Image (spheres, rainbow, N blue to C red):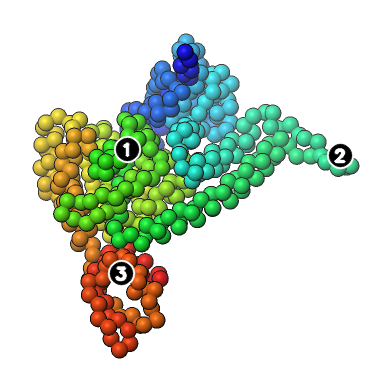
């Protein structure tokens, strides 16, 4: 019988800067950092804390007295890994590792570890590998003393050669080029899949939201799928799509996307952009919020900011779904129901119990019906390809042959109209 592998004892520290107080409450920020750490199965979080800073110190981030105090705390608790919930420079990371004699990861490194543990599709794995290499490349700048050694030059003329740091950076750059080529091939394949889906006349409904808001649970409830849904951050990374028949409404494609998070590492922005392209093609966006979370308002602002950065226009139909109402006390639930009753774009639901889902589905059906508009098109006899595409999309309501070609009455979505214009 195999014994369980011993888990690494980790401690989470959230540096609270005065400049951060207006933006993020340190308590829920620390809770999120602990939840991030708990998302890695090999870690055991044995403690956490908020460290208040007037300003970050360039050498160690924390002041010398705090560094010594924490060194004693970490030693007494036999900590092997410290997670700093914020950015660390390579010099700060190296100095703290020396002072505390532990391995250190900053927020970017931790999220990269989670993504590499969770990515399943070929594209997701490649994106994470590229992000990790880009991150490691920045760590080479005077990060470790052995990288400052020089290698001998080649050829007959002895020269200083290249330093180890230059060699390592060159190796990373070469690997990045190889990964980029592989990723380009995967992206082309995905484009073909998207074009194939574009021929299906079903509207696309995209679920977006902060990580652990309950998107995958809602997706499973609506589609009968078995997407991984756990009470942890980044339980699912790769987008999933399923067909759903709405009650008294059209069939739609429901898309479950990766969860958002505040202070997303810059190395992962490209990976997010790739996996969230489905959102840009959606006819309706459903923003799922964990309404029971203490920082739900801050999380909602982060999601809206990321959607704006992706180029999602404000005119796109969008619903806000306040999920996890089953975790609220009766008074709060009643207040939520009153508020959502006054706003047609707000819905209070529980993806776990199914409460509130019928009104949401009916509203989605109505919204998608409203997004379709009727238009009359005139096509020449030579435009058989465009005419065939319209029939494939099942948008033709009536057709009349004329002396010069065809006059068609179509009922379509703005997305279909844009695709038709591009033919």
- Residue holding disc 1: 226
Foreground mark, 2 or 3, reads: 3
Q: Which mark is residue 391?
A: 3
The reply to whether discs 1 and 3 touch (Cβ–Cβ < 8 Å) is: no
Q: Are marks 1 and 2 in contact (CB under 8 Å)?
A: no
Depth check: give the residue in front, 227 or 327.
227
Residue projecting furthest to the top: 76
Location of residue 262 (image quadrant): top left
Residue 211: x and y, percent?
Answer: 34, 38
Q: Which numbered circle lies on residue 38? A: none
Residue at x-position 28% and y-position 57%: 203
Residue occupying the point 27% across, 80% down:
407
Say left or right for 422 vs 416. right
The residue indicated by pointer 2 is: 158
Q: Earlier in the sequence, mark 1 or mark 3?
A: 1
Of residues 359 and 246, the one drawn nearer to the viewer in this rendering: 246
Residue in the foreground of this view, choosing between 199 and 68: 199
């Amino acid at each position: 019988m195999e014994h369980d592998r011993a888990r690494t004892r980790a401690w989470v520290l959230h540096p609270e800067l005065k400049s951060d107080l207006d933006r993020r409450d340190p308590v829920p920020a620390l809770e999120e950092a602990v939840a991030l750490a708990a998302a890695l199965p090999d870690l055991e979080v044995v403690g956490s804390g908020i460290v208040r800073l007037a300003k970050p110190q360039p050498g160690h981030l924390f002041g010398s007295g705090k560094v010594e105090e924490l060194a004693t705390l970490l030693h007494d608790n036999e900590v092997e890994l410290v997670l700093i919930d914020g950015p660390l420079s390579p010099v700060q990371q190296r100095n703290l590792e020396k002072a505390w004699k532990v391995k250190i990861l900053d927020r970017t490194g931790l999220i990269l570890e989670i993504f590499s543990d969770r990515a399943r599709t070929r594209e997701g794995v490649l994106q994470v590998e590229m992000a990790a290499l880009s991150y490691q490349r920045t760590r080479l700048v005077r990060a470790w003393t052995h990288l400052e050694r020089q290698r001998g030059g080649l050829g007959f003329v002895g020269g200083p050669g290249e330093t180890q740091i230059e060699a390592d950076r060159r190796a990373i750059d070469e690997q990045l080029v190889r990964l980029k080529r592989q990723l380009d091939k995967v992206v082309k394949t995905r484009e073909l899949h998207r074009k194939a889906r574009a021929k299906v006349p079903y509207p696309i409904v995209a679920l977006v939201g902060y990580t652990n808001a309950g998107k995958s649970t809602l997706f499973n409830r609506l589609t009968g799928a078995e997407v991984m849904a756990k009470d942890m951050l980044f339980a699912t990374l790769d987008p999933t799509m399923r067909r759903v028949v709405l009650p008294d409404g059209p069939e739609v494609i429901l898309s479950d996307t990766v969860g958002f998070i505040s202070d997303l590492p810059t190395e992962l922005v490209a990976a997010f952009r790739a996996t969230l392209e489905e959102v840009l093609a959606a006819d309706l966006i459903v923003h799922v919020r964990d309404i029971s979370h203490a920082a739900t308002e801050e999380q909602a602002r982060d999601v809206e900011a990321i959607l704006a950065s992706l180029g999602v226009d404000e005119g796109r139909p969008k619903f806000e779904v306040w999920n996890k109402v089953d975790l609220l006390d009766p008074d709060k639930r009643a207040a939520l129901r009153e508020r959502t009753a006054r706003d047609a774009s707000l819905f209070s639901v529980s993806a776990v119990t199914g409460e509130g889902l019928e009104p949401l589905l009916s509203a989605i059906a109505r919204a998608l019906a409203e997004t379709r508009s009727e238009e009359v098109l005139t096509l020449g006899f030579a435009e058989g390809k465009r005419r065939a595409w319209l029939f494939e999309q099942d948008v033709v309501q009536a057709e009349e042959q004329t002396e010069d070609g065809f006059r068609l009455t179509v009922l379509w979505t703005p997305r279909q109209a844009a695709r038709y214009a591009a033919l």
